[in-house]
Image (tube, rainbow, N blue to C red):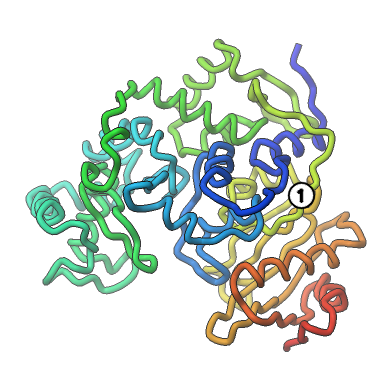
Amino acid sequence: MKEKISLPLARRIALAAQGFADPAPAGTIDRRHLQRVLSRVGLFQIDSVSAVVRAHYMPLYSRLGSYPMTLLDGAMAGRKRLLFEYWAHEASLLPLELWPLMQWRMRRARANDASEIYKGLAVWAEDKKAFIEEILQEVRRRGPIAASDIEGHKGKGGWWGWSDAKHAFEWLFWAGLITTHSRRGFERFYDLPERALPASVLDLPEPSAADAHRELLRISARAHGVATYADLRDYFRLSPDDTKKGIEELVEEGALLPVAVEGWNRPAWLYKDARMPRRIEARALLAPFDPVVFERTRAETLYGFRYRIEIYTPAEKRQFGYYVLPFLLGDTIVARVDLKADRPTGVLRVHAAFAESGAPPETAVHLMEELKHLRGWLGLERMEITPAGDLGPALLAAAGPDVAASG
């Protein structure tokens, strides 16, 4: 008979798996803390929008508090790097030890398998093999190099305006024939894996595709604590067949335990080593691409939090705002806030704030404290609040005399 898990316990299990039950760091935050978070979450999703801060910097802040962003920068490049970039849950930063586990995806990309590479890119590559090889030789000769450095192939901007050179770099990146050496600003500089990554990583044995899928699902299960089939599959964007077989194998070995979660109408599994804390004392702003919320159905069924990115929604049709961060308090997402880091003026702009159903009376006070911490971490001098949204007036009232009203 399946063990039954209440929804509040499922939330606590999930948040503990993501590192929100770990004690706050004492003293300087260093690579040990980064590695601890990474061992929980398994990946940091990358996104280009910098309305507040690039998305991959936020998960560490949400779990550790103010840390030097140079800590993550140093882990992304150089001889002491801990991370590499590849396609996992979208473009992601992954621990170096996952390089062998992604080789099956790279092989499928090299074969132009449209299940593992954007279909348009696969179609483009069919009759561009000679050109792709030319670009690879340029990287071999000149790397590290940016796509924009290839003379005579300047892109026109945006995905649909990619030049042939940009297409070729992306195809080679999917195929694992080149990798990110470093970034300047947000632009990738590519090089050969043997020059960008440690030999100790490249020399690791390559597992079979089936073994790799099972291990990726194990990491996904550990990062979720308790999860459905869709949750487990989504973390590394595995195919249905690969996911089904991997889950069956993990259940057979006892790594996944079938459970029934209150209110979920789908099968679920508990990771064998999942922690079950009695309380979660979290207080954190989350990036839109944080693993806690990046699978939107899970966010809704687990936290009762319906979340959609409105970046590409016309301003007049947005419900909550351009760049909205969920606010986690205890074991519940209690609010959301539309933010903008106005770096030229040194202002953290709070455009609107909204309370979730059932948010406790002290939500505005806790959110204001967290916003003040965020302002300090971002190195901004002031905060201005537009009292929009149903939580906006209470947030402004909780701000104190050092925070100005705006709008």
Q: Which residue is mark 1?
A: 282
Q: Quadrant of residue 339?
A: bottom right
User: Measuring 46% from the left and 39% from the top, which residue is drawn there?
Assistant: 237
Q: Where's the N terminus, which quadrant?
A: top right
Relative to the observer, which residue lies in front, 35 or 279? 35
User: Measuring 66% from the left and 41% from the top, which residue is drawn there?
Assistant: 19
Q: Is residue 18 left or right of residue 184?
A: right
Residue 62 shows up from this direction: yes
User: Measuring 30% from the left and 33% from the top, which residue is drawn there?
Assistant: 200
Of all residues, the one furthest to the front in this rendering is 27
The image shows residue 211, relative to residue 131, as above or below, that is above
Q: Is residue 143 left or right of residue 391?
A: left
Of all residues, the one furthest to the right in this rendering is 361
Residue 376, horizontal then vertical, whole percent: 66, 71
Q: Secondary structure at mark 1?
A: strand
Relative to the observer, which residue lies in front, 355 or 123? 355
Q: Quadrant of residue 28?
A: bottom right
Residue 141, horizontal then vertical, whole percent: 10, 55
Residue 301 shows up from this direction: no
Relative to the observer, which residue lies in front, 381 or 384? 381
User: Measuring 81% from the left and 48% from the top, which residue is drawn there?
Assistant: 330
